[in-house]
Amino acid sequence: MGRVHPEETGSSFIMEAIIKYLMSDGEKPRILRKNHIFHIVPMVNPDGVILGNSRCSAIGRDLNRDWSAPDMDVTP
């Protein structure tokens, strides 16, 4: 997972590189794809990143505090 907070710009570049690597034609990426399932979330908080909210979504919810009991209407 990448980019929970707006200031974590480096994680966006790392996630892009990981996706490109895993989708490449090399032998190692093919083996990885064959033997593993990857769940990749390049940007966890896109609305917060766009609005510059350090921890909150666009509706002001702190996404770091909603992991254990997420509300799909408020924190999908």
Image (tube, rainbow, N blue to C red):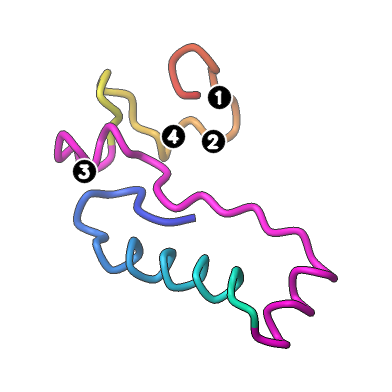
Residue denoted by label 1: 70
Mark 1 residue crowding within 10 angstroms, few (<14) / some (14–19) / many (20+)? few
The answer to whether mark 2 and mark 4 are in CB contact below 8 A is yes
Residue denoted by label 4: 65
Q: Is residue 21 magenta?
A: no
Mark 3 residue crowding within 10 angstroms, few (<14) / some (14–19) / many (20+)? some
**In the depicted view, which residue is nearer to us: 56 or 46?**
46
72 over 22 or under it: above or below? above
How far across and down, in percent of the image, does residue 7 sit? Answer: 19, 56
Please give the name of the residue rendered at 44% of the width and 53% of the height, measured from the top-left corner.
42
How far across and down, in percent of the image, does residue 48 sit? Answer: 25, 35
What secondary structure is found at the residue carrying circle 4? helix
Q: Earlier in the sequence, mark 3 or mark 4?
A: 3
Horizontally, residue 22 falls left or right of residue 27, namely left
Question: What amino acid is labelled 2 in the image?
Answer: Trp
Measured Cα–Cα span from mark 2 to mark 3 = 16 Å
**In the depicted view, which residue is nearer to us: 28 or 15?**
28
Measured Cα–Cα span from mark 3 to mark 1 = 19 Å
The answer to whether mark 2 and mark 1 are in CB contact below 8 A is yes
Residue furthest to the bottom? 27
Measured Cα–Cα span from mark 1 to mark 4 = 9 Å
Question: What amino acid is labelled 4 in the image?
Answer: Arg
Question: What amino acid is labelled 1 in the image?
Answer: Pro
Label 3 vs label 4, nearer the camera? 3
What secondary structure is found at the residue carrying circle 3? loop
Measured Cα–Cα span from mark 3 to mark 4 = 13 Å
Q: Which mark is residue 54?
A: 3
Measured Cα–Cα span from mark 2 to mark 1 = 6 Å
**In the depicted view, which residue is nearer to us: 34 or 60?**
34
Q: Quadrant of residue 70?
A: top right
Q: Quadrant of residue 2?
A: bottom left
